[in-house]
Amino acid sequence: MSTVSETLAATWRLAAPYFAADDAGEISFGRLGRLRVREKWAGRGLLAAVVGIELAIVAITVAINTWNARFYDALQNRNWDSFVAELGFFCMLAAAFILLAVYQVYLNQWLQIRWRRWMTERLLREWLSDANHYRMQLLGEYADNPDQRISEDIQLFVGKTLSLGIGLLSAVVTLVSFVGILWGLSAQAPLMIGGTTFDIPGYLVLAALIYAAVGTVLTHLIGRALVRLNFDQQRYEADFRVSLVRVRENAEQIALLEGEAAERARLMDRFANVMGNWWAIMNRQKRLTFFTAGYSQVSTIFPFIVASPAYFAGAFQLGGLMQTASAFARVENSLAFFISAYTQFAEWRAVVERLAGFEATARAARKVPVTPPMVAVERGLGSAVTAHGLTLALPGGRPLLTVEDFAVAAGERVLVTGPSGSGKSTLFRAVGGIWPFGDGVVRVPQGANVMLLPQRPYLPVDTLRGAVSFPAAPGTFTDADITGTLRAVGLPALAERLDEVALWGQRLSGGEQQRVAFARALLHAPEWLFLDEATASLDEESEAALYRLLMERLPGITVVSIGHRSTLAEFHSRGVRLVRDGDLHRIKAVPQAA
């Protein structure tokens, strides 16, 4: 786990950009209208308002402390007029406190949602840009469960950072405000033990400091394991949730294989991690609660124990005792802020570590395509896609494929074959610019419109119209074009369901999904189309029909296909085969007649 200084540094890196953001945003004032301002000024303004309200609340608590002395003196002296006056004064303080407390919560929540929206947009940009999400998935454990990082951890980070930050500020300001009061009261109520008076300047402050210091040290020793336990709990919960989602996404295969029992056992194994870690949290939290609850109860009477000898000796009245107890409690609570907030602090540190790890992995993934050795994609003059002296490797660095001479001219139709695991799909990924692992350059014509269709198409949870049009913006294609294309690729039943929203990746069979992918390609009409076993789920007759449709609708298109069926050869002008090369198991491209 990171140290406190590392956690604070990570918090600054995560939080500071929001309050320096130049993005333009809107502030709504209900019926009064909207005001468009830079996000940093909205954030700073809301934070300043929340902080200002907190300072005002502390000022009210100081006023209530001095009111305690007057009010209880009025009770002891049975002074009705003073009693009524003090009640009226308290009502004014209470009304102000209520108003400030309500608007502090309101403005705090307003700041939270704006800050969370900005951070969500920022992390989504870092994650979903230039295939960074794909590289992060390949790089390491800190990129696990990005859904949790973005949806849950940002919310926890913003809420707990504000809560702990405002709480710490309140504790410091309260401490400064009440230390002077308590110091003065120490002179009025000197320390008395067994009838002997001890002249110790500010002894009440010293007693509060010692009491809080002992409590803080013991709290940390008992509860420090909660930081790691909370970190692990979030990870285990996310792993369990992802496993459940995978079962839902693969329900058909599990049912066909009658794999429910195996999946149930696997899910319960994942949940066993959740439960085991939860028991560890429970046991640690039990110990911590034993101490903090006892500490809290003792702190209620501790100031009376310290100051009562002087009160019974007649050194001051009941009002002075109550004021002393109140001031002592405020000072002690401020010094013991770490104790009361320890559980929150442990959860917050775990959240900061997860977000910092996610950002670190995002930064590392962004550096991979620009840090030699790497596979670079250059766009320039020429009409061919070429790769010479190219080496593709796995993320760990082990070489996978050596391409000595590979070129596809505009208008060509090339069939790529080879044994499984030889690097065919990886070559396509390199051409698509998402595989930087290795060394060399892939050259693509300037302005070339390239589309790659994988074996398993991606269909977003959207209307069918949006799923077919992806990644184009809504309205790019007319409904007539979409329905006509769906009928052309053999999906007439879907042509009337454009407005239907569904999990299309589960609703449609593998063959239907590949037909939708072909419809997508026909609508986008790319100049270069790379098909990575994009018809593997179709029968040979349907595959041939789609290839013919592609050639008819897009006669000038360049097609490069990966496939294993010999029937594909008639739709390609030449073939390229990947073969083993020597004992080193290196792979190179060897031209072969189709």
Image (cartoon, rainbow, N blue to C red):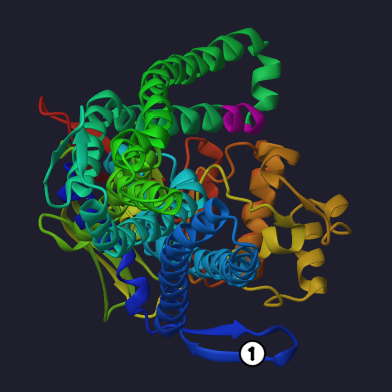
| Relative side of 579 to 508, left or right | left
Q: Is residue 122 above or below residue 293?
A: below
Image location of residue 522, percent across then percent down: 64, 65
Q: Which residues are magenta?
A: 244-249
Is residue 525 visible in the rendered image? The answer is: no
| Position of residue 592 measured from the top left corner of the image (x, y, whole percent) | 32, 44
For the point 38% across and 29% down, the residue is 298
Q: Which residue is mark 1?
A: 34
How crowded is the residue under tag 1: few (<14 C-alpha within 10 Å), some, or many (20+)? few
- The number of numbered badges drawn on the structure is 1
Magenta-span inclusion, residue 293: no
Above or below for 130 versus 592: below
Question: x, y percentage for residue 386?
Answer: 26, 63
Quarter of the image where the N terminus is located: top left
Front residue of this view, candidates 400 and 296: 296
In this rendered view, identify the residue nearer to me: 492 or 185.
185
Asked which quadrant contains residue 540, the reply is: top right
Q: Is residue 93 left or right of residue 274?
A: right
Q: Residue at x 70, y 18 (%)?
A: 255
Q: Is residue 430 left or right of residue 557?
A: left
Q: Quadrant of the C terminus?
A: top left
Q: Find residue 4 and report its image quarter.
A: top left
Say which element carries label 1: strand
Seen from the viewer's position, the closer of residues 269 and 424 is 269
Task: Please name whichever residue, 539 or 148, is drawn nearer the observer in this view of the structure.
Answer: 148
The verdict on residue 246 being magenta is yes
Majority SS type along the magenta span: helix
304 to 283, vertically: above or below: below
